[in-house]
Amino acid sequence: MNSTGFTLWLTGVPGAGKTTLAQTVAAELRLSRNNVEVLDGDEVRQHFCSDLTFSNVDRDINIMRIGILARLLSRNGVAVIVATVSPLREARERVRRLHEAPFFEVFVDCGLDEVMRRDPKGLYAKARRGELQNLTGYQDVYETPLSPDVHVRTDQEAVHDSVSRIIAALADRGVAGVRNSSQAVGVNGVEPGNAWL
């Protein structure tokens, strides 16, 4: 059930739906391969990058550490799904250049009004109250991808639709071990949810 490794790099502002997509895409991929890993930016920062701040230099170091980890896993046959804000284009491009295995950038696009409404971690509320500074995409820069491999609009489509588009893009690009999206029905035959967390 193992196949060629690759990295699926989900980038977008906080609350755009990266973690929801990463978990749902991973569940879908696990139907046809058993070597799938999700690297969630918040979890990686907590366990491997707790020494870093949110300065631009430290954000860059954080993205490079995640990128190196994704590179090591993907070149050894693992399907790696990274869910991290990664706000700077140059940092994302450096990570892409590091990879020997296929690398796919997914722009998880969601309008500011919708991410502020969702606000799953309360970050936007804290920023509005002045308790949080430099929130990416709100008080600090987020450089949108210029030509992502996949562009999903989570404020305009259901989770299932975004997942299907990502899976279809992987299949269309010939990634081994990825089923065609027309076959993708979700975990244990149940369609993925249509609600963003």
Image (spheres, rainbow, N blue to C red):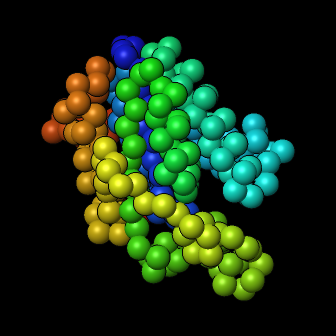
Asked whether 80 or 96 is in front, the reply is 96
Is residue 117 visible in the rendered image? The answer is yes
x and y percentages locating residue 174 in the rendered image: 23, 25
Q: Residue lying at the far bottom in this picture: please name it.
A: 129
Residue shown at 32% from the left, 50% from the top: 147
| Residue depicted at 70% across the width and 42% down the height | 61
Q: Is residue 51 above or below residue 114?
A: above
User: In the picture, residue 43 is in which quadrant?
Assistant: top right
Identified at 32% across, 63% down, the residue is 153
Which residue is located at x 69 percent, y 56 percent? 56
**Residue 108, quarter of picture:** bottom left
Single out the residue that lies furthest toward the left. Answer: 182
Q: In the rendering, at what x and y percent does residue 36 appear?
A: 47, 27
- 87 to 72, vertically: above or below: below
Position of residue 188 in the picture relative to residue 182 (left or right): right
Q: Quadrant of the N terminus?
A: top left
Do we see residue 189 in this rendering? no
Residue 34: image location, x then y, percent: 44, 20
Name above or below for residue 157 compared with residue 34.
below
Residue at the farthest right position: 51
Residue 153 left/right relative to 184: right
| Number of numbered markers | 0
Give coordinates of residue 3: x percent, y percent: 36, 15
